[in-house]
Image (tube, rainbow, N blue to C red):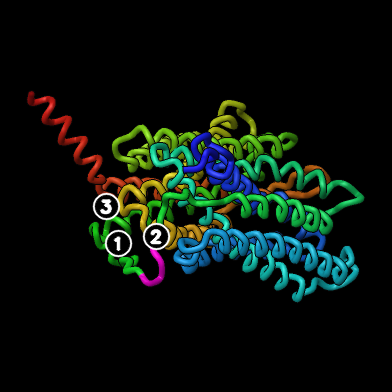
Amino acid sequence: MSEEKKTGGWRENKWFRAAIPGLLLHCSIGTVYCWSYVSNGISQYIGYDVKTVNWAFSIAILFLGLSAAFLGNFVEKDIHKASLIATICFSVGMAGTGFFVWLGGRSYNGGAGAPSILALIGIFLCYGVVMGIGLGTGYLSPVKTLMLWFQDRKGLATGLAVAGFGAAKAIGAPIMEALQENPKVGVVKMFYILAAAYFVMMFVGHLLLKKPAGWHEPSSSEKKPSIMEVLKTKPLTNYIGIWLMFFLNITCGLAIISYEKQLFMTVGFVGVAGTLGAISAVFNAGGRLGFSAWADTMKDRNTIYKLIFILSIVFTAIALITNGIVNQGQSSVLAILVVALIFVVNAGYGGGFSNVPTLLSDHYGMGSISAIHGITLSAWGFAGIAGPQLAGLIIKLFGGDTVTFESHGKTYIANPLGYQRILIATLALYALSLLVCLIFVKPTEKALAAKKAKAEAKKN
């Protein structure tokens, strides 16, 4: 062993080789969740309504899940190529989005012309498909590496990087708003500036990312169990349960988070909606780090999901029973309860993400974790469509009168009754998630052994 390895030089240091590159990658791609802070600006610039423009976000999340599912084995074999592909796709997709927004604005010309269908399709392709592929490969690339470097605190390690995904919103949202409001920048140049900045961040992360020297990845000539063979080491209902509770948690989270800013305004916080959005992003990041680090101390990591779902059910039920949303800011106490619900949903949403790879590794080992994690992230892709579209459908079918808010020169339309009724659906889905968690996801061998040892100790 070299002197550098003995002394913990940076070339073999877990922070420089896993934690920092993981944060650089996830802090960049996590800005996808700043979409609600740019969608209104894009809508007004190119002449399409926000609902139509929002399909770009749904497509991005769908392709995140699909690319993670189909490229999981590729990431497993070569994290360097995967992280480089992520860097190129994400930054090129963001720059391309800026170009097609410019093209759409040129055609629309502030209402003097017609909206350009070519520009809209270009935005869907660049932000949705190209950036979505960058999201999927970029999300997977550092996860296994982190768990290999931090064997004893896998939850803390993955939570730290995945927290960067949540923190990206807290960092990126105010920057995006400031760039859009700057008359010398605006919405188009904002995308170009961010594309360049994120390319640098992700490329540095790509250069630093490295698996531990002692880890041996099987070569193509070596026999390796198929994904299905690995999953069949446990009852298939166990994996289906993990996939389902992950899907349901994201669906509920996105149904609420996609209308987060309008919710803050509806309950009376118009002037500070952006600040509260940044705080909710801190809860999202804190849930990713806090819940995963907490799960490291538990004998059965699935317990953390039970806690997440119970907290979500309790706070959703309180906001539903008290009619805090339709109250529209007339009671500060009820308004605070709605804000608390949004913070708890963000924390549970983030915690659900950070605990999935470690829960899977507890059940199925580290050998094929990237591939299995990638397949599981398909739940994120489908939930990216299901959550916002479910919320939109409920508002359309069961919503009431709309109210309009003005903030930073932009107009926001809210539907208080529609938002209140979204909570009925999310409450039912959170309850279903808890049942899935309790019935289908079985304890690991480690948890069963600990339970048996505890029972024997009581006998003695």
Spatial CA distance of label 2 from label 3 is 18 Å
Q: Residue at x 19, y 39 (%)?
A: 449
Tell me residue 99's x, y (percent).
80, 66
Tell me residue 267's x, y (percent).
63, 36
Kind of residue at badge 3: Phe
Tell me residue 184's x, y (percent).
91, 50
Q: Is residue 129 above or below residue 216?
A: below
Q: Can you see residue 344?
A: no
Name the one closer to the observer, 263 or 146.
146
Q: Tell me if 278 is positioned left or right of 338 in this view.
A: right
Kind of residue at badge 2: Ile
The image's mark for residue 230 is 1
Q: Tell me if 409 is positioned left or right of 308 in this view.
A: right
Which residue is denoted by mark 2 in the rendering? Answer: 372
The magenta stretch is: 217-221
**Mark 2 touching mark 1, by CB under 8 A?**
yes
Label 2: which secondary element: helix
Q: Sequence order check: which comes first, mark 1 or mark 3?
A: 1
Which residue is denoted by mark 3 in the rendering? Answer: 440
Q: Seen from this angle, which residue lies furthest bottom?
A: 118
Name the one closer to the observer, 90 or 79.
79
Q: For residue 220: magenta?
A: yes
Tell me residue 305's x, y (percent).
38, 42
Q: Name the front one of labels 2 and 3.
A: 2
Q: Can you see residue 9?
A: yes
Spatial CA distance of label 2 from label 1 is 9 Å
Kind of residue at badge 1: Val
Label 3: which secondary element: loop
Q: Is residue 118 above or below residue 165?
A: below
Name the one closer to the observer, 154 or 271.
154
